[in-house]
Amino acid sequence: MEDREYNNVYAIPANYTDSGKLFGGMLEPRNAVETGILVVLLGYPELMLIPMPGIVRIIVMTLTVLPLAVVSMMGIDGYSLFQYLGHIFKYLKKRRKLHFRRVGYKYAAAQIKKKKDRSKKKRKA
């Protein structure tokens, strides 16, 4: 009998992991909701409350709301816009400030003593 080679390799379509997304896998639901919220919050005052002629309103909204909506729909670095802003604020809140001694610099005794006093206070607390 003749031995046949079997090909067990299957092509995985590009949209395999796109389930749960909108517009054919292009937009995540969280990004769509955030975009809607931002457009309403920024677009309503520009459209209804600011006294401008119609053409000027369209131009102002094109320059402000449209870019914000596009960035919000795309997201930043794989995160939604609000998640990314949360990461920025969390970093700013919890970041550490590192201080290094300069090489070859002669510190005054008061400066060295002051730094030691601070470290003792932190240990007691």
Image (spheres, rainbow, N blue to C red):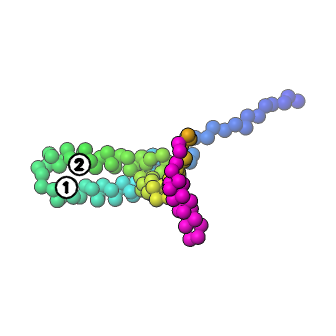
Q: Which amino acid, mark 1?
A: Leu
Residue 16 counted in the magenta span? no
Cβ atoms at labels 2 and 1 below 8 Å apart:
yes
Residue 64 image point, x, y percent:
26, 48
| Quarter of the rendering occupied by the N terminus | top right
Tell me, yes or no, if residue 57 can be seen here: yes
Q: Nearer the viewer, residue 93 or 68?
A: 93
* Marking on residue 61: 2
Residue 109 counted in the magenta span? yes
Marks 2/1: CA–CA distance: 8 Å
Residue 68 image point, x, y percent:
33, 48
In this view, the residue farthest toward the front is 109
* Marking on residue 47: 1
Q: Nearer the viewer, residue 43 or 3?
A: 43
| Quarter of the rendering occupied by the C terminus | bottom right
Q: Nearer the viewer, residue 93 or 35?
A: 93
In this view, the residue farthest toward the bottom is 125
Residue drawn at x 63%, y 37% is: 11
Q: Magenta span: helix, strand or loop, mainly?
A: helix
Q: Which amino acid, mark 2?
A: Met
Q: Nearer the viewer, residue 109 or 97?
A: 109
Tell me, yes or no, if residue 83 can be seen here: no
Range of residues picked out in magenta? 105-125
Residue 99 image point, x, y percent:
52, 50
Residue drawn at x 46%, y 59% is: 93
Q: Residues within 10 Å of mark 1 (few under 14, many from 20)?
A: some
Instruction: Point out the tag, 2 or 1, that comes first from the N-terminus.
Output: 1
The image quadrant of residue 89 is bottom left
* Marking on residue 81: none
